[in-house]
Image (cartoon, coloured by chain):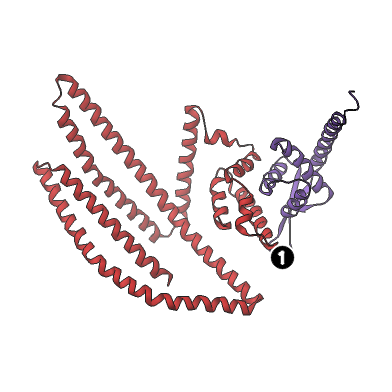
Amino acid sequence: MNTQFKKGVLELIVLFSVEKKDMYGYELVQEVSKVVDVNEGTIYPLLKRLTNENYFDTYLLESNEGPPRKYYHITDKGITRSKELAELWNDFSRQVNMFIGGNIYE
Amino acid sequence: MNKKEFLKLLEEKLNVLEENEIKDILEEYKSHIEEKVKDGNKEKDVIESFGDIDELVEEILKAYKINTKKVNKGKTASEYFNVLVDEMAMFFKRIIKVFEGKKGDDFARIICKFILILILILILRVPFDIIKDLGVEIFSEFPWFLGRVISYIWKFIIELSYFVISILTIYVSIKNLVLDEEVVIDKEEIVRKAEEFEDKIDSKKSNRGERVKMNSSDSRIVLTPLSIILRVFVVIMTIPAFFMLFGLIVFFGIMIASLFEGVYIVSLFFIILGLIMITSSILGIIYKFIFGKGGRN
């Protein structure tokens, strides 16, 4: 799959996952790799970017095993962004589906 | 590449970022690797799955809106200049940081090393002068002003290359001195980590821990007599090398004295210089061998 395309979709999936529930880095990576086949190393830069752009907040929480984990929490700005992206995706996929289905133009 | 190496490399490549940001990123990757290993993956495989580290660094820096292409492959001269200035600033910052955390002893040690390097550079002046004079001598045989022009250019090239080499030597050696200190800290950390790890094994699986410990002590017993014999042998071997080095240095002194007297035997001079270098590097290797092993046992 085209990497640029993948990145856009990846952002949507990450935003959606965190919107459902606060997650820590590794948990999120696992969640995302269930949906798309992606180099897991590249998810952390994305998380960093989304945090820098204020779509996510972070906080530390003690864990049963090992050091405290950094959890990601979606902000209002992030929710707006995720809605925006979802809309874009829906439009896009609808058009592609229609085109592939070929019903409308024939 | 193991976890330690990967994190170290990542840290170096991210050095344009602020320290707490670097720490934050390293922490994420560290815990990712640890979780993956806990799930039964091999450390090496996990790190390989990250792909090319430069691409990864590019991705991370993009998250801060830093264009790595511009940083690494600046097209105009001014961009190159900026990169150079940045690098120099980082370099001095690191040196100052290292000095800040130093006690008097360490400080004196580093100064001594630095002075030694300066002396070495001064000695390096001698062959350069010889080459320069040799060229001037040859070019003076050329007809009228041509010889003079060429000999001026020749002098300029030689002086310039000496200057560049000196600056580079100073730069590299300072960098090494700084790095040296960092490596020491690193080693201590590794040892500490290893001890922690051993403790964990001990507390969780005492049987297994004991077996591991027994194995390692066994190998130590086997190693010690062998290494002692080896070391004695090597020491005996070094004695002639020491004499050779001593003789060569004396001869070198005579050569320099004769140079001032006006005797030119350039080829012999270089042969002696080369031999001194070879012998001293061999001695250096042997020294490292003895003391390297000595430190471990």
| Outermost residue, front side | A106
Left or right: A65, with B132 as reference point = right
**Percent coordinates x, y for residue B175 in the rendering:** 42, 48
Amino acid type at mark 1: Glu
What is chain A's hue in the picture? purple
Residue B51 on image: x %, y %: 61, 47
Q: Is residue B247 left or right of residue B87?
A: left
Q: What residue is pinned by disc 1?
A: A65
Relative height, residue B120 to residue B84 (above, below): below
Total numbered labels: 1
Q: Nearer the viewer, residue B152 or A5?
A: A5
Q: Is residue B99 visible?
A: no
Residue B180 in the image: above or below residue A56: below
As drawn, B206 above or below A37: below
Q: Which part of the image, by quadrant, shows the C terminus of chain B?
A: bottom left
| Front residue of this view, candidates B109 and B240 | B240
Neighbour tally class for label 1: few under 14, some 14-19, many 20 plus, Cα within 10 Å: few
**Horizontal arrangement in the rendering, residue B45 relative to residue B95 (left or right):** right
Please state if A104 lies on the left or on the right of B179 as rendered: right
Residue drawn at the location 35% of the way across and 62% of the way down: B288
Q: Quadrant of the N terminus of chain B?
A: bottom right
- Residue B179 appears in the picture as rendered: yes
- At horizontal 72% and vertical 42% (from top left) the residue drawn is A50
- Residue B281 x, y percent position in the rendering: 30, 56
**Pointer 1 indicates a residue of which chain?**
A
Indicate the quadrant where residue B32 lies: bottom right
Tell me which chain appears red: B
Residue B171 spot, x, y in % from top left: 38, 44
Label 1 SS: loop
